Image: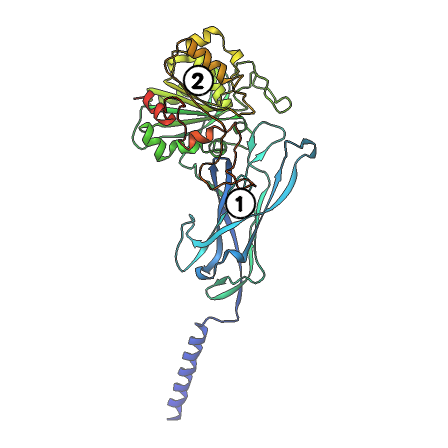
Amino acid sequence: MKKSVKIAMLGALLMVGVGLSGCKSDNKSVSLKGDYTAYLQGNDWGENLSQITVHLNQKVDGDSLNKKDFKITEVKDTFDWTKPDKGVFEVKNLRTIQAVYISDKTGKKVKDSSEYVTFKMGATPYEGRYYFLSPDAASSQYPEKYELNIKLQKDAKLTSEGNKVEKLTVSPKIKSLKTDADQFKVAKFHAKDNVDYQYAYFEPKEKSDTLVVWLHGLLEGGSKNTDPYITLLSNKARILADEPFQKTIGNANVLVPQCPSFWMDKSGKDELVNGKIVSDGTSYYLDSLHELIQSYKEKVGAKKVLIAGCSNGGYMGMLMAKTYGKEYDGYMLICEAMEDRFLSDSDIQKLKDLPLYFVYSKDDPTVIPSENEEPTIARLKAAGAKNVQVAHFEHIVDQTGKIKDEKGQPYDFGGHSSWVYFFDNAVNTNDTNVNAWEWLAAQVK
């Protein structure tokens, strides 16, 4: 009898022990460690590091997350072109946390708990810029130094499996970088004259006989700490692969070459003089770019090719138009930087028979309309041009209502930024209301 009682008591104690070991301690605290994937997006004003997804060593409780419990400080090197004597210097910026939630590894929201936590941060012309503007080259580059220091605030309520998180340690350097241009792939091309290109490309699921070539602006080329994703994300060039544009154009392959320096470079070794380009109406890259386009055209089986470009790229588009003419099916010339004085009367006679669409803002301080587009357009019309379209604006300002200046007015991108309206599909000719995207589509139908 006594032996049976002892066995029963022992069993009860064991059961209690098991029960206690399965309980969560209200007094237990934990320390979490992790790293993060960053998400880079292209906007009207440029690139922004707008979101990060932190991977932790154990799950956190979704209902314990509060954006007020975190602090994210950006640390990076920068260079101010208006103060070149200052050289490269470090800056620290407090990032705005707009939202925080548990997610899967791609940043998609999930319920209950997860080892992934996603932060959405402020993305404006004033906050979250990622690229480094190099003092020794006319290009944007990936930063050699960029960190996000993610800290818990003193009285944070964050919990992991019901236990209070006392310490959060996240590696400050980016583990991997995702972008909203990842639908593009990247490749290289070696031309006969030994010019080496990197280029981005997009091919629609349904085979297309149309190719759209986008020629970038000044700061999006180069060969050091760069790749074509910088070209795609320095504005919204990646929308050329998105459904609205693809639907309008009727599906198209997209080619985005990255110039090894800049398109207006006449020697392949030119440098900016007092921050400006000294052009002579030629380009070192004319033949090699044409070769690249022809090679890619054959690769995808394209029969129709549209050339579009802004600023430096608009200059190159105009140079290709006067050199190769009807070999291409249409030219979208946005704030094009070919000075009218570089176009001869014979050039005008050749250009007048081509499909040309000019886009510019009258307040452009970089490419002065009275020295570039306006006299060229007048000469073309006087020569009897039949398919020259013109869309000009007074200013280039935010049309979404989301970006304001310090006075609460729509943000002014600056008169040179007329590509903003093109990518937002907000370009129509002033006299006949011909839409830019629809005009491009009409040239290949």
Q: Is residue 235 above or below residue 51?
A: above
Split into 4 quadrants, where in the image is the N terminus? Answer: bottom left
Q: Secondary structure at mark 2?
A: helix
Q: How is the image coloured?
A: rainbow
Decide which of tag 2 and tag 1 comes sooner along the chain.
Answer: 1
Q: Which residue is mark 2?
A: 290
User: Outermost residue toward the right?
Assistant: 85
Q: Nearer the viewer, residue 138 or 8?
A: 138
Residue 277 image position (x, y, % from top left): 59, 20
Task: Categorize mark 2 by other alpha carbons within 10 Å: few (<14), some (14-19), many (20+).
Answer: few
Q: Is residue 271 above or below residue 109?
A: above
Q: Residue at x 43, y 82 (%)?
A: 13
Residue 232 image position (x, y, % from top left): 46, 32
Kindly tell me whether residue 192 is visible in this rendering.
no
Q: Residue at x 49, y 63 (%)?
A: 159
From the viewer's perspective, tell me whether residue 85 is left or right of residue 130. right
Q: Nearer the viewer, residue 236 or 206?
A: 236
Query: Any mark on residue 426, and which?
Result: none
Callout 1 amino acid = Ile
Q: Secondary structure at mark 1?
A: loop
Callout 2 amino acid = His
From the viewer's perspective, tell me whether residue 195 is left or right of residue 79. left
Q: Which residue is mark 1?
A: 174
Kindly tell me whether residue 233 is visible in this rendering.
yes
